[in-house]
Amino acid sequence: MKLELQGMTKRFGPVVANDNISLIVQPGEIHSLLGENGAGKSTLMNLLYGLYQPDEGRILLDDTEVKFSGPGDAMAAGIGMVHQHFMLVPVFSVAENVVLGNEPTNAIGALDLATARDRVRDISARFGFDIDPDALIEDLPVGIQQRVEIVKALARDAKILILDEPTAVLTPQETDELMEIMRQLAQEGTSIVFITHKLREVKAVADVVTVIRGGKVIDSVSPSTEVGELASLMVGREVDLSVDKVEATAGATVLEIRDLVVVDERQQRVIDGVSLDVRAGEVLCIAGVEGNGQTALAETLLGLRNVSEGTISLAGEDITHASVKEVLEAGVGYVPEDRKKDGLVADFTIEENFMLDGSFSKPFTKGLSIDFASRHAHSEDLIKRFDVRTPSGQTLVKKLSGGNQQKVVVARELSRELKFFVAAQPTRGVDVGSIEFIHESIIKTRDSGIPVVIISTELDEVFNLADRIAVMYRGKIVGIVPPTISREDMGQMMAGIMPEGVSA
């Protein structure tokens, strides 16, 4: 099915989110919509999916104009959408989620689950998804949940599939699998609109790349276009995608972890005998397939999880059983992997979010009251230093783009006096311009002598930032290797295998 958007414009008050956007997606084409967070990509797709109504412009399917009053109209016309944050009911089965809102019924009007299961099996077999129709969503890994979302769209005979930042929550392996699925869908005639800000993925899978900046189409180019040129089109200036750093001069051990064991609510060992040393002035990256204990390790370091066995010491101080408040006061800076859930209060202003770690101390208090003048000055300083794009510090954090929200978290944590800094997925869902800035901030922290631990599933990020890489598998450290290790050997270690000839 051919899709054409003509002069699409959408305003939210004085803000023009989409400004006269036109593009064509041919049948069986993977058309990438590339741009920074806040560029207007998702707004445009929400117009196409009927979630928003355009102020101006037309949508044409196979040269016939269509109007959608809601997602139901779009789905009926053959458009499916997989959102960045999945629209699945965790306690429902795969089959129940796939037919939700379009339930097959038997002769007496009851839900026909057998037909629902057959739909899942048929589509899964066609694309090699290997999905159990009776599995509960909450028990499935993120990569499989995304496949369920694709099955949902295909079960309604989608001819055009919108994928909104589909790899934001996937590991590198799951990303590669998704690329294969996209190619197969396109070969069978499905048109795909692929919304992303990741240049490597665009070059790997797209047929056409349309760059959007500031709500406008900047250009449509071939995916063979140089990475640097694509990045410049996205942000409107030259972007250095490499991390400029000198070789680390590691000092004394600051963080010492010995024989650490942490169990979850099912009494399973999510961290199983981990020992690590992190030295002053180095970046230790912890890599691995998501769900192998990296998140649990970060949360344990902050005091969010209880230690069953082993010890953690920071600059000689035992913090094994310290509370979160005590850990923060001991000088630990922490960037969580989910900024919206764990890093920010969405309905607070930027100024208020900047004071979350230190509400009872200077520069935020004077006696028993908030020192609003000092708080404002502190906020203005951080906004400038960390290049937070906002009208003012009084802006609610939920109104910022993802990249600017992440800058608020990073700025807050790095503005304190630190002995140690840990960041989990520091650039997840962040645009290329913000990635550049966050990486620079991390290296500056390292160069100031503060030890840094980065937990990331982005291998490019790991290789760019790391002075050493610790690979986790099923709660254990497989080995600690230099960033010169090959991707192939790294892949084996992430699967729990130590490659021949690799010294750990």
Image (tube, rainbow, N blue to C red):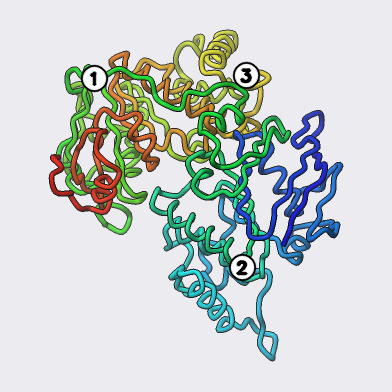
Q: How far apart are marks 2 and 1 (CA)?
A: 52 Å
Query: Secondary structure beneath disc 2?
Result: helix
For label 2, count other residues whose C-alpha is less than 10 Å away and answer few (under 14), some (14-19) or many (20+): many
For label 1, count other residues whose C-alpha is less than 10 Å away and answer few (under 14), some (14-19) or many (20+): many
* Foreground residue among 286 and 226: 226
Q: Distance between the residues labelled 3 and 1?
A: 33 Å
Q: Earlier in the sequence, mark 3 or mark 2?
A: 2
* Foreground residue among 488 and 124: 488
Q: Picture coordinates of residue 143 (x, y %)? A: 45, 57
Q: In this view, does 214 lie to the left or right of 184?
A: right
| Residue type, mark 3 in image | Gly
Q: Which picture quadrant has residue 431? A: top right
The quarter in which the C terminus is drawn is top left
Which mark lies nearer to you, 3 or 2? 2
| Residue type, mark 2 in image | Leu
Q: Mark 3 points at which residue?
A: 393
Q: Is residue 59 above or below residue 73?
A: above
Total marks in image: 3
Query: Secondary structure beneath disc 1?
Result: loop
Name which residue lies at 82% across and 41% down: 7
Q: Picture coordinates of residue 57 (x, y %)? A: 85, 45
Q: Name the residue under label 2.
A: 154
Q: Earlier in the sequence, mark 3 or mark 1?
A: 1
Q: Distance between the residues labelled 3 and 2?
A: 44 Å
Q: Which picture quadrant has residue 266? A: bottom left
Q: Picture coordinates of residue 193 (x, y %)? A: 64, 51
Q: In this view, does 263 lie to the left or right of 423?
A: left
Q: Mark 1 points at which residue?
A: 280
Name which residue lies at 30% across and 50% down: 292
Name which residue lies at 73% across and 58% down: 2
| Residue type, mark 1 in image | Ala
